[in-house]
Amino acid sequence: MSYKKNVSSPEKLSLKTKFIFGMSNIGTSTVQGVFSTTLIIFYREKLLLQEIYLIWAFLFYMLWNMTNDPLIGWLSDRTKTKWGRRIPYLRLFTPLLAISFILVWLSPTTGEIGQESVFVWLLLTMLFYDTCYTATYLCYVSLSQELSMEHSERAKLQVFAMLFGLVGTMLSLFLPALFLEGTGKETFIQLSVVLAIVQLIVMGITSITVKERLEFSHVDEPFGFIDAFKHTITSRSFLTTVAANFCLILIQSIIFGNLFFYIDYVFWGISSLLVLLLFVVFLLGGIIFGRFYLLRLDEKRGLKTAILVTLFLLGTGLIVVGVLPGLISIGAMFIVGIGFFGAMTLMNTAFGEVADDDEVKTGKRREAAIFGMNAFITKPAQSVAGIFIALILLLFNYQEPINGVQQQQSDFTVLGLKLGISIIPGLIVLGAFLIFTLYPLHGSELQVMKQKIRIMHHEKKEKYRSEYSGEKKKELIF
């Protein structure tokens, strides 16, 4: 998509742009999915790192998460180059993300270098990986809300990103099951190299092909860090959205980060691949239904209603999965799938509306600062999830493998896994449902805001055309 087309017709996105933009999500979703689903079980069962070290690692990881996301978001919003303010970060950090992902899995075992050394390796590589992932994904999602201001176009773009991301998520579930269970860690390391290369290629294509709308980075004068923080954290639309999103990130981290514990031990004696396949089939069925049902609901009743239905179905489905016995419980994954689709597509669209609301109030387009503050608040949920599951394993007497062989868990331990990975996450999502009832952007208030934003963007586009014409567009400005 050429720059000229971006300026003259900014609200409509070509199929090519949507496809290429969405395609890159398969890489980041796969590496992040493998990182989330496999990290704890890899370090606990392959490297034999004790739970107390995992808890300390995730505590430090949480503190780092609370620092780097708003800082990177603020820096991205202040960046001015001839490529824009998102693309340069994608081009720089995408290869570093691939390198950091590989390093996470290269640690020797505790028997080779000791518990403390493996802990240090885990901590340093986690921090390196998270910094690279933050810079890459933060600018990626910020770009998704700037390419078009039309709600319908944003929703369609999110569907493409979600569908490719779903492929990555499925790969992150099946590949560890194939390459981790019953094999040495060297085989999994080889897999990590392949996944890192794929991520590098697909995000690299996006960073070269997709063009930014330069009027936002060149016309707006960005806030200082403190002012950016204040304007974001005092927004009611932001606070309600980020609170609900915190709950979603928390339960996603709990579930996907520990799904193999659930599959291996709750369904002990049944093929793990068969159980995983059943989970995926019912989940995909719900996602397909949700694709039509929730997007139509969004169109007819508005984004707020669609997200409330999403949260209710997701929370209820998770509780039912944990309560029902045996394989019959997997059928409730259809309900979870409907909610999962909404969570993956509609929440980022809500943050786009939050950015619109913020721009009307401040006059500045600040997606990265908003997504950065979102990560400042929600990224610690990943660490909380790691600590939560480590505590579940301790409190419910988890028995670690002996000589690499998994041990059947007691009924008490299985109960703990059901509570920790299904029932409690479902209750958390229902809490998010209650929070999002306070979301203010709907009805006539939303329509007035949308009209104001169209006028502002027309004025910014005209100002950019008049002030940055000819050779000046080619200048590299920081």
Image (spheres, rainbow, N blue to C red):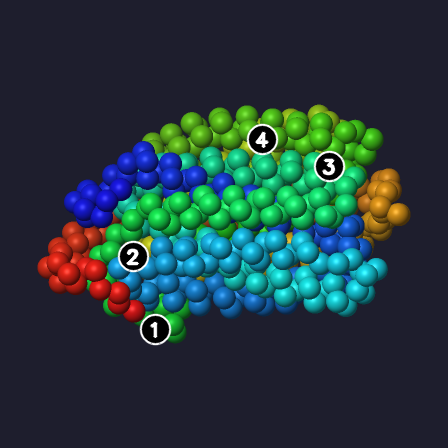
Picture coordinates of residue 221, whole percent (x, y): 25, 68
Going from the N terminus, do you reach mark 1 or mark 3 first? 1
Amino acid beneath label 4 = Leu
Amino acid beneath label 1 = Gly
Q: Residues within 10 Å of mark 3 (few under 14, many from 20)?
A: some
Residue at 63%, 66% (x, y): give it. Answer: 124
Q: Nearer the viewer, mark 2 or mark 1?
A: 2
The residue at which mark 1 appears reads as 224
Which secondary structure lies at badge 4? helix
Whether pointer 3 and pointer 4 mark residues with C-beta atoms closer than 8 Å, the reply is no
Q: Residues within 10 Å of mark 1 (few under 14, many from 20)?
A: few
Residue at 49%, 27% (x, y): give it. Answer: 288
Q: Judge left or right: residue 312 versus residue 390.
A: left
The residue at which mark 3 appears reads as 263
Quarter of the image holding residue 16? top left
The disc label shown at residue 321, or none: none
Residue at 49%, 55% (x, y): give it. Answer: 95
Amino acid beneath label 2 = Trp
Amino acid beneath label 3 = Ile
The residue at which mark 2 appears reads as 83
